Image: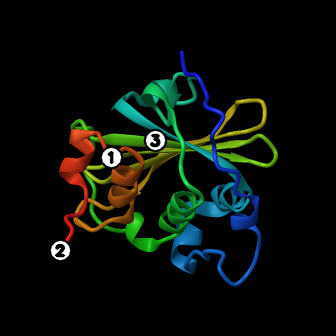
Amino acid sequence: MIRFVASIVLLAPLCAPGADAPVPSEKLAKHLGPKVLEYLKRVEKIEAYKVGQLDEKKAGDADRVSGRVALGEAAALTKEQAGELLKALLADDTYFRSSSLGTTGAAVGYRLWTDRKECLEASCCLKKGNLRFTLKDAEGKVVFDRGVGGFRDDKASPMRALAAAVFPDDKDIAGVAPKKP
């Protein structure tokens, strides 16, 4: 059973339109589609999880984050980490680099909750660089579920750096984190 923690960062100011709000490229907007972009614009809070193996048939299950089983409780993100995640999720390099299927140990998942109680679940294998989204409406019904691309050949990916910052004591995640110069 997943238990939610109370120290989840509220993000409404980060998602409000303005000079600092991340904007997707035209190519990415077309790739993700209007529904995903609408969810990303309305994010109010984020939960982070270490996750296990992917089972696409179980996407939408309460104990899973975009098809990957959640391992333990949610980790809190700082406001800065939440902003970095939103920037990474709106960056071309997160989606249009190579990826490969599967999970090899270091994987994370995020639940991004909107102000309307909808949820965008994003999970990724940090070693293979694949990224998957599951969108749920306010009633928990899955309205979108698919792999959306990857970042395998980007060793400095912000997705890897963020996972290492959120889970600093995880050896598998540290093993794929960008190396500091």
Mark 2: give few (<14), some (14-19) or many (20+) Cα within 10 Å. Answer: few
Residue displayed at 27% across by 68% down: 156
Query: Residue 12: horizontal and vertical position, in percent?
Result: 76, 59
Question: Are the residues tagged 3 and 1 within 8 Å (C-beta)?
Answer: no
> Which quarter of the figure has residue 108?
top left
Circle 2 or circle 3, nearest the eye? 2
Question: Where is 31 relative to 61, above or below?
Answer: below
Question: What amino acid does circle 3 point to?
Answer: Gly
Please determine whether, in this image, residue 13 is positioned above or below residue 58.
below
The answer for how far apart the CA atoms under marks 2 and 1 are is 18 Å
Image location (x, y in percent) of residue 94: 40, 65
- The residue shown at (28%, 39%) is 170
**Local SS, label 1:** loop
The amino acid on which the numbered mark 2 sits, given as a three-letter code, is Pro
Q: Name the kind of residue labelled 1 in the image.
A: Pro
Residue on which the image places disc 2:
181
User: Is residue 28 at all visible to an observer of this figure?
Assistant: yes
Mark carried by residue 168: 1
The label on residue 109 is 3
Q: Name the residue rendered at 46%, 41% in the picture.
A: 109
Q: Earlier in the sequence, mark 3 or mark 1?
A: 3
Mark earlier in primary sequence (2, 3): 3
Label 3: which secondary element: strand
Q: Is residue 124 left or right of residue 112?
A: left
- Any mark on residue 56, and which? none
Q: Is residue 158 above or below residue 138?
A: below
Please tell me which residue lies in front, 45 or 63: 45
Work out how far the residue at label 3 is from the one at label 1, CA to CA, in angstroms. 15 Å
Q: How is the image coloured?
A: rainbow
